[in-house]
Structure formats: structure tokens, C-alpha cells
Image (cartoon, helix red, strand yellow):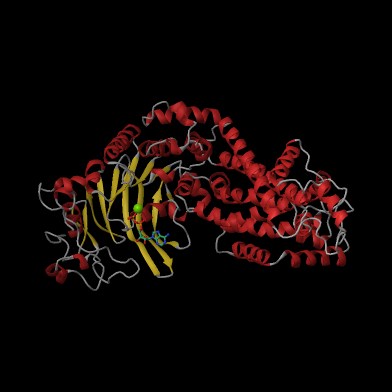
Amino acid sequence: MLRFTLNRLAQSIAVVFLVFTITFFMIRLTDGDPFASPKAMPPDVRKVLVERYGLDKPLPVQYFTTMGSYLKGDLLPSMSYQGMWNTKIIKDAFPISLIIGVAALGVALALGLPAGIIAAVKKNTWLDFGPMSLALIGICLPTFVMGPLLIMLFGLKWRLLNVAGWFEKTDWILPAVTMGLIYGAYIARMTRGGMLEVLNQDYIRTARAKGVPGWKVVMGHALRGGLLPVVAFLGPALAGITTGSFIIEKIFNLPGLGQHFVSSVFNRDYSLILALVVLYAAVLVVVNFLTDILIAWLNPKVRLS
Amino acid sequence: MSAVLDVKDLQVSFHTRNGVVRAVDKVSLKVEAGQTVGIVGESGSGKSVTCYSLLGLIPSPPGKIEGGSAMFGGMDLLKLPEKELQKVRGSRISMIFQDPMTSLNPFLKIGTQLVEPLRLHKGMDKAAAWKQGIEALKEVGIPEAATRMDQYPHEFSGGMRQRVMIAMALITRPELLIADEPTTALDVTIQQQVLDLIKDLQKRLGIAVVFITHDLAVVHEVCDVVNVMYAGRLVESAPAAELFAHPRHAYTRALMRSIPALQKKGEPLYTIPGLPPDLSHLPAGCSFRPRQTPDRQLLCLRDQRPPLVEVSPGHWAQACPGCVEGGILS
Ligand SMILES: Nc1ncnc2c1ncn2[C@@H]1O[C@H](COP(=O)(O)OP(=O)(O)O)[C@@H](O)[C@H]1O
Ligand SMILES: [Mg+2]
């Protein structure tokens, strides 16, 4: 287990480093630069800015100084938000996305797992068709339809929650539910598929032949194997869901991380793009690591190898 | 001797998109205490379905028990509600299956699976059950039983897994063991060991065994009574010695001819021509007719199912004039 952990740690660091390097050079290949604003900038102002951010230095020098700062934990100042540090931008926005993302995942699991399990056990009955039809609708319904729909009901009609913004303690609920319903729909279908496959296995027949009661067969013998596909899906999903969604943030007017992903690219904000992509890679790597541990815990065959 | 299990006119069918599959058609069989009763037949003849339906293990739908009775300990298993059947399964009647590689749960420790019947049916606490589990593994000849309890199925070979299955089936000391082709999926050398183990335990514990196989050589070795199944029906049933000495039905004789060990050296291996019939579109008369030689075919019943008659004391065969050798007496 220790070797497994160390191995993965080394791999993770390598991945983040690679992402850092590729991103650093890729963004510089795009047209324009951080200071190519539509309004022509006086050449001397531009020169000052370029010098301040070190963009006049040769590329390898920029690369190594940037890496040096990153290694010290300094993510450099933003090039488009004047006077803002990237660390500060992330510190303000990431927690919001994280709260909403984790809550959304909670909603998704709370809905998707039971629905999927029941649908598999009660295959081809209305307990299967009902939830699975809803799940299909959930998958087909885009966020920008589901979100406003919930806003209309809970915000405008019943006036239970704020329609948008990030002011009150309850403001995470609507965005989390919007995302949770959609992810929940995916999880329900995946759980059903996984469970159906396992419930057809010979060892389930063995369990029944031993006189194990029906619900115990499902929970004690089928669940572990049935959940493996869901767990494998959860890793990448969690990374995506906790680093913010541009659409959700636009619908609910949230100061989350997703907006920065989009705006930093439009602004050619080299340093902010780099900071966000590295953060995303780091989150993905951590979450994948946790997923692997969870899978190893679920599946003894993986554990040994 | 009293019958441990008495199955009468069991009828099972599967209602599928392609029609009704009559998997088991009026099968009757009796298992006396301490006896080993064999069910033989080609793959697809309804051997497994016969046994699974006794324990409520056929998937339903599409499976449906259409009729018959199966008396066990004063109860009709076919009429028992699922809750009551659960108390019988794994406690008074146990099963082992064909493929030991897939029949154990890959996610659970051997020990956990092994002692589950004790925990369920005998209400034993974990420690006591675990201890008895170790004994059970020793009993089936698994070395280092205590360590093996903590391992997972993939750390066991096929033969060892089948030993675990046997230990698990017998751990509650059931009255009846149903073994569904327990050696078919194993290597030949391992087959013999597992057969010997079943025979030995059967003798020591005095349990009755229903032994399903498609291999007459295995039947010859372990069974007291043999039931030959073809296309969902019994075509012949007799004490083993009698059956091997005087096989009466053409299908039984064909099966015997296809045992390699009973053939003269150098002769090409005999295989029964043709295939078993489609169980959803059975021919009206004798179901073996399409595979008979042309002159025999002429004699086979075409309009009605040949009835099972007692051709000599204790020896039953399907009374089809084309298939029964030596005529039908009585
Ligand atoms: N779940 C099922 N659905 C439809 N038909 C089935 C099902 N299970 C078994 N059958 C049919 O029942 C027949 C007997 O099968 P089985 O008892 O497994 O044969 P075997 O003698 O090889 O054990 C087969 O021909 C098969 O088509
Ligand atoms: Mg079978």
C-alpha cells in the first residue's frame, strides 16, 4: 500500500508538472497578448506593462522564473485584473465552487444511487421505468433550462430562496440542486447498469442458494461490484464539478471559479490561465488518487496488484 | 427407507419472445436417504432447471413452474413462500455449481462467504462461525485453513474454489446436496479429486445427493440411481447397475456409446448425430425421433408423447417403440 501511494504521488507530481509546462507554452502560441486591448494602448504604457510582467525576457527565462515562483507557492499577479494576485482570486472563488460542487455531488448520489439500485432490482417494473424515464429527462435537460426552472419555482413562485447571487447561507441550494439533478441522472443510469450486470453473475445465484434474503443479496453481495463503474466516474466528475461551472455561475450570478476560466482565456491573461489550469490538474490528480484508493478498497483484486 | 425428496410431474417453462420453452416436462424423481441420484443428459436438456426450480432459483419471469410437487420434509417446496424457502436453502438443501471460478463472490473474503450460512441459519456469532469455518475448510482438504479464510477467491485455484463451495454447502449439515455439474469446469486430474471428496463426505455425513452431469462415466462412479433426461423429459430411470447392464432407451445407449473409456481402442469416438430439439417447438411424438436411424424413425411415436413405463422392476423407460430395445413388457 505504501509503495502504491508513493508511486501515485510521484505520478501525480509529474502530471501537474507536465500540465504546467504544456500550458505555459501553449497559451503563448495563441494570437494576441494580455495587453492587446481593443483600444489602442499608448506604446510607452504597454512597454511598462510588458516589462513589469517580464514578458520581454526570453521565453526560457520566463518559464524558469515562473516555475520558481510556483515552487515557492506564489502564483504571480493576474495580468488582466490589475493589482490582483492569482492566489487571492482563487482563494475568493474556489471555496464557492467547492461548496456548490460537493453539495451537488451529495444531491446526485442521494438521488442517483437509490434510484439506480431499485431500478436494477425491480427491472422492467414501474419502479424501473419511472425513475429511469426521469433520469433520461434529467440528462437531456440542459443546465440552462433546469436552472431557470428551479429559480422560477423556488425563487419566484414560492419565494423560498434567492433567485441568484451569493449573499445568504442558503444560496448554494439552487445551484447545487440544479447540478445535482443532472449528475444524479447520470449516476442513476450508471448504477442501474452496474447493478444489473452484477445481479446476473453466478455468485449472486450462489448467495441466493445459501438462503440469503433478497435485500441482503443486493446490499451484501451485489453492491460493491455494482458501484465500481460509478466510483470510476466520480473521480473526474468531482474535479469538474468542484472547479466551477461557467453556465451555473452565469445563471445564478455566482462569483465562482468557472467564470475565471472563461474570462482569463478571453483576456489572454497568461498568468491566471496558468494558475487555474494547474489548480484544475492538481484537483483532478488528488481526486483520482482518492478514487483509486476507494476502488482498491472495494475490489480486492486491484488491491493486491 | 423414506424419501428425502419426492418430485412428481414437475413442469417448468420459460415464456420468452420466441415462444414458450418447455424446459422441464413432467419430471418425477425420488431421492432416498443417503442415496446419490444422478441426472444425466446433454447440455440444454433441463437438468439445471429441474433443480433450480425446486429451490425457487429460476428467474421469474421468464421462468414459471407450471405444475407438479416436490415433497421435502413434509413440505411441498413448489408451494412454499419465498421466506420459507430461504430457510430451507443453504440450511437443509444446499447447492454447488458448475463453474467455481464465477460462483464465489470476488469481493468478499472466503471466510465471510463460507460462514454466511451459519450466521444466517444457525444464528451463530462471528467468532464461533469463523472457527467452524476453519474446520470446514480442513474437512475439504484445504491446507492452512486459518490463513485461507482471510483470502479472496482469486487467490484460489479452480479446484480449491470448488472445495470451498463444497465446504460452504455442507457447513450447515444439510439433508440434501444438489451438485450441478460440479466437476465439468475442472481439469481432468482435479475432477477426480473433487469427485472423491464428494463421495467421501457423502458417505461420512450420510447426506442424500442429487448429482447432475452430462458425463455418464462420472455417473457410473458416484450414482446409485440414474435418471436420463432428454429435451426436458425423463427418458429412462433405473438403479445404476441395472441401467449400465441393460440400457433400454436409444438415447441412453447412444450416451453410453459416446463414453471414450467404454470404447474399444482405435475406434473413432462416437457422437450422437444431430442436435437436441428446440424446446419451444418440440415434435409432437417422440422427441428423440429426428436423431434416430431412418428405419428406427419409422417405428417412433409421432402423434403422442411416449409414456414412461416400468420395463422391469425399478427400471423405467419412455415407451417409444422406435427407441426401446427389448420390447415393452408389463
Ligand atoms: N432464463 C432462461 N430463459 C429462457 N430459457 C431458459 C432459461 N434458463 C434455461 N432456459 C432453457 O431451459 C433449457 C434447459 O436448460 P438447463 O436446465 O440449463 O439445461 P442443462 O441440462 O444443460 O442444465 C434450455 O434449453 C434453455 O433454453
Ligand atoms: Mg446445466
Query: x, y (%) of residue A241?
Result: 71, 53
Query: x, y (%) of residue A242?
Result: 73, 50
Image quadrant in which you'd find residue A183: bottom right
B104 lies above or below B257 = above
Q: Is residue A149 left or right of residue B242?
A: right
What residue is rendered at 20% in x and 70% in y?
A: B301
The one of A199 and B23 positioned closer to us in this rendering: A199
Give the residue at the far front of this rendering: A44
Q: Is residue B269 left or right of residue A21?
A: left
The one of B223 and B160 positioned closer to us in this rendering: B160
Query: x, y (%) of residue A226?
Result: 55, 50
Q: Is residue B173 visible to the viewer in this orientation of the structure? A: no
Q: Is residue A83 left or right of residue B211?
A: right
The one of B305 and A126 positioned closer to us in this rendering: A126
Query: x, y (%) of residue A173?
Result: 81, 55
What residue is rendered at 50% in x and 30% in y?
A: B130
Image quadrant in which you'd find residue A131: bottom right
Image quadrant in which you'd find residue A120: bottom right
Give the residue at the far bottom of this rendering: B303
Which corner quadrant holds the N terminus of chain A?
Answer: top right
What residue is rendered at 17% in x and 65% in y?
A: B292
Q: How many marks?
A: 0
Q: Is residue B155 visible to the viewer in this orientation of the structure? A: yes
The one of A92 and B132 positioned closer to us in this rendering: A92
